[in-house]
Amino acid sequence: MHIKTSTQEKINLGFGDYTCNWGTHICGFYENDADREDMSLGFLHQGDLEGDLQFYCPAEKPKEDFLATYQRNYPDCAEHTQDPGRFQVLEAKELYYPDGTFSPSSMDKGLNEFYQVSQQHGRRNVRATAEMVWALEAIPGVEHLMVYESRLNYFIPGKPWVSICLYNINRFSGAMIMKVLQTHPYAISCGVITKNPYYQDPDQWLRTNAPEFIV
């Protein structure tokens, strides 16, 4: 089933027979390891088969567990996880708060630098997915997580990039899940992807919730 999410080329999401278009920001909700792995492993393996660059941040388990699971599930592609030209796998601290503080501005800078490097040799499709449970820890600046999520809607459109941000609905509050919905134009729940009616344009969301972060 195709969900039209932009005017760019189609991407096979690798789960549920879904396709959408590049340049899309999605939140994925899960309740258990099996749900999470259906989305993340399917998404990344499809990209691996198609020669995309996989950018993944595990948080429920150490990255070594993810790598072992991927290699076990897809033995023909096992060695690909060791190739930085195919896979970039970072722990949450490495990606989101390397100096101990989470900063939306630092994330903007880091993602732009990563994207520029990824495109040095021509157009390269990027599949990014991250498990967000790290944000439940008492990390300085984590209160600005939704600012970062909202501002991704400036960064992603128009690029050969799809991000799936994975949220464990058993661990995040209902109020937080509503903020997640407000900052992602598309959502996956129970394996079904839909256009999200609660989404707010980043100009609107930031003006209401964090005007000091308006670009």
Image: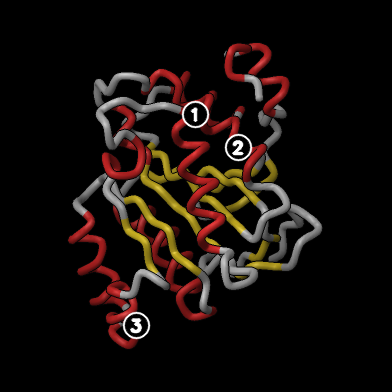
Give left or right: position of 157 versus 40.
right
Residue 78 location, quadrant: bottom left
Compare marks 3 and 2 and give the one earlier in the sequence.
3
Q: Amino acid at mark 2?
A: His
| Image coords of residue 26 (percent x, y) | 57, 46
State the residue at coordinates (59%, 66%): 125
Q: Amino acid at mark 1?
A: Ser
Number of marks in the rendered image: 3
Disc 2/disc 1 C-alpha distance (Å): 19 Å
Height in image: 178 above or below 90? Answer: above
Q: Amino acid at mark 3?
A: Cys
* Residue at numbered disc 3: 77
**Quarter of the picture holding the N terminus:** bottom right
State the residue at coordinates (48%, 80%): 49
* Residue at numbered disc 1: 105
Q: Secondary structure at mark 1?
A: helix
* Residue at numbered disc 2: 184
Q: Secondary structure at mark 3?
A: helix
Pair 1/3: label in front:
1
Compare marks 1 and 3 and give the one earlier in the sequence.
3
Give left or right: position of 126 versus 74.
right
Residue 201 location, quadrant: top right
